[in-house]
Image: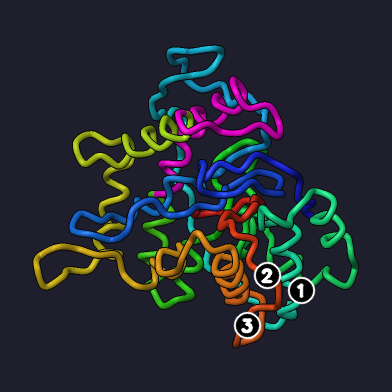
């Protein structure tokens, strides 16, 4: 059984910390849909696979200030494309109360803890539900939250690509987003690992400057003029953007739903309810309702159990 362990959540800043063996970090999509919206906007997090806090990813050296990096560039040395795998749907594997309890124990920053998350996972009554909610990127199909192929490496986090497919987006489109996002994750993972190794000991806080540095690295990979992953993002943008009457482009509703761009992301209650719905697509009954916690006032989920494709 995969045991979720406390890690620093980098979404970078907007996400939450998490309890997972590697970490995608709950990603609160960056900008809202607009004239120049792109499908890459959604994951300035990360969601991106993060590894355990303190792991030295051995990324490129950049200028340092007070022991921390101040800049970094994307690097695709050794990169190979990830192969997208469709959602591993196990309807009714979880009761709504089980999903809510797991999200509270492992993902919501106001209520989660290593102890609480471990207790939920180690309860035999939750075995089938746990097996549905969390999986490995090497599995034949992907769970809603997926661990990466290697500790500290890219490829883990919330399975946003699977969510897109389950919401009705074509499998080929979901695959395009997964491939593009993994490219960006891979290219900036050394930057992420260096940030954590240099300035963020386990349990430490990612600063605004560090978050911006990581976001800048991700932006460099998507730049149409020479971005290392730009060619991979092109088909994802083509299928996830729709034209508006004024000639602009906006992200499709399915994308906004999966990335919680259609709710108040500052409301812990709204985020918690959406997470129950997100996991419920794979593991729950057909209709998902909130199972009861009060709004803690913070929207970040502490989630970090990594997922492929997002």
Residue at 49% of width from left, 75% of height from top?
Answer: 166
Q: In the drawing, what numbered circle is on residue 98?
A: 1
| Secondary-structure class at tag 1 | helix
| Secondary-structure class at tag 3 | loop
List x then y, in percent, for residue 123: 89, 65
In three-dimensional space, the C-alpha distance between marks 1 and 2, rounded to whole angstroms, equals 17 Å
- Relative side of 65 to 276, left or right: left
User: Furthest-bottom residue in view?
Assistant: 286
List x then y, in percent, for residue 161: 47, 62
Instruction: Please tell me whether residue 265 is drawn above or below residue 257 in the rendered image.
Output: above
Q: Earlier in the sequence, mark 2 or mark 3?
A: 3
Q: Residues within 10 Å of mark 3 (few under 14, many from 20)?
A: some
For disc 3, the marked residue is 289
List x then y, in percent, for residue 307: 58, 54
Q: Nearer the viewer, mark 3 or mark 1?
A: 3
Query: What are the residue bounds of the magenta stretch?
Result: 181-209
Q: Quadrant of residue 94?
A: bottom right
Q: For residue 71: magenta? A: no
For disc 2, the marked residue is 294
Residue at 11% of width from left, 73% of height from top?
Answer: 245
List x then y, in percent, for residue 7: 69, 41
Q: Nearer the viewer, residue 244 or 32?
A: 32
């Amino acid at each position: 059984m995969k045991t979720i362990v406390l890690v620093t959540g980098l979404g970078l800043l907007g996400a939450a910390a998490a309890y997972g063996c590697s970490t995608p970090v709950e990603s609160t999509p960056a900008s809202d849909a607009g004239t120049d919206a792109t499908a890459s906007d959604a994951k300035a997090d990360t969601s991106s696979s993060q590894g355990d806090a303190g792991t030295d990813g051995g990324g490129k050296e950049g200028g340092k200030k007070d022991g921390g990096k101040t800049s970094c560039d994307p690097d695709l040395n050794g990169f190979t494309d990830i192969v997208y795998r469709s959602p591993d749907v196990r309807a009714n594997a979880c009761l709504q109360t089980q999903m809510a309890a797991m999200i509270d124990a492992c993902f919501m920053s106001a209520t989660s803890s290593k102890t609480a998350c471990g207790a939920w996972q180690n309860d035999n009554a939750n075995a089938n539900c746990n097996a549905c909610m969390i999986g490995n990127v090497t599995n034949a199909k992907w769970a809603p939250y997926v661990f990466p192929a290697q500790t500290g490496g890219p490829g883990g986090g919330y399975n946003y690509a699977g969510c897109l497919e389950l919401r009705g987006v074509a499998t080929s489109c979901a695959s395009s987003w997964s491939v593009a996002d993994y490219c960006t994750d891979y290219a900036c993972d050394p930057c992420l690992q260096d940030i954590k190794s240099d300035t963020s000991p386990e349990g430490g806080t990612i600063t605004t400057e560090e978050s911006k540095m990581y976001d800048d690295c991700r932006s460099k990979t998507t730049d149409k003029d020479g971005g290392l992953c730009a060619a991979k993002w092109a088909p994802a943008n083509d299928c996830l953007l729709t034209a508006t009457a004024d000639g602009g482009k906006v992200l499709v509703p399915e994308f906004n739903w999966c990335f919680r761009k259609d709710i108040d992301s500052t409301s812990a209650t709204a985020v918690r309810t959406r997470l129950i719905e997100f996991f419920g697509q794979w593991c729950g009954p057909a209709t998902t309702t909130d199972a009861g916690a009060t709004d803690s006032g913070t929207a970040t989920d502490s989630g970090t159990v990594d997922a492929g494709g997002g």
